[in-house]
Amino acid sequence: MKKTSCFILLSFIFFCCTEDAAYKKKIQEAELFHSSVQNLSDIIVYDIFSPPVASRIYMYPTIAAYEIVAQAYPQNYKSLAGQLKDLEKISPMTQDVCPHLAALYAYNLAGKALIFF
């Protein structure tokens, strides 16, 4: 009985300590970003923003997300800093940051900040 309990406990520890990397693939799918854009669109439609305000609400979060992706993949994307008035370079990301998740977070955070303030 003691050996069985020990075996079950060790098996449980072994399976709990393995890393599930499926989320890393899921984060890279465009569907998450598309659903964030759809959520922002739903809010804009519900609150009946004027077209100039709505365009700003779309533009600022999209630029925030783009700047993060441009920093993560400089060979594919050029930063908009210096091309847009008053836009400065963002601080460098560390190696531990997932650029896809950071871009999604920046988009959602900037969108909420524009709508609620």
Image: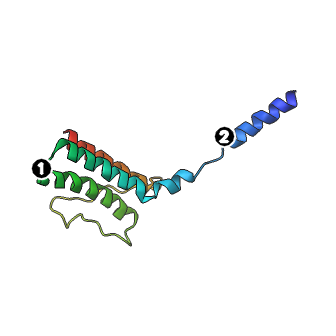
Q: Position of residue 14 (x, y in %)?
A: 72, 42
Q: Position of residue 46 (x, y in %)?
A: 21, 42
Q: Quadrant of the C terminus?
A: top left
Numbered circle sitting on residue 16: 2
Between the residue at mark 2 and the residue at mark 1, the CA separation in whole angstroms equals 51 Å
Above or below: residue 10 compared with residue 60: above
Q: Residue 92 lies in what quarter of the image? A: bottom left
Q: Residue 93 lies in what quarter of the image? A: bottom left
Position of residue 46 in the picture relative to residue 50 (left or right): right
Above or below: residue 39 compared with residue 2: below
Q: What residue is drawn where x is 23% and y is 58%?
A: 88
In this figure, which colouring scheme has been used for the structure?
rainbow
Position of residue 45 in the picture relative to residue 32 (left or right): left
Say which label, 2 or 1, has the lower sequence index.
2
Q: Residues within 10 Å of mark 1 (few under 14, many from 20)?
A: few
Mark 2 vs mark 1: give the one in front. Answer: 1
Which residue type carries mark 1? Ser
**Mark 1 — residue?**
50
Q: What residue is drawn where x is 42% and y is 52%?
A: 101
Q: Residues within 10 Å of mark 2 (few under 14, many from 20)?
A: few
Q: What residue is drawn where x is 30% and y is 69%?
A: 78
The answer to whether residue 103 shows anywhere in this view is no
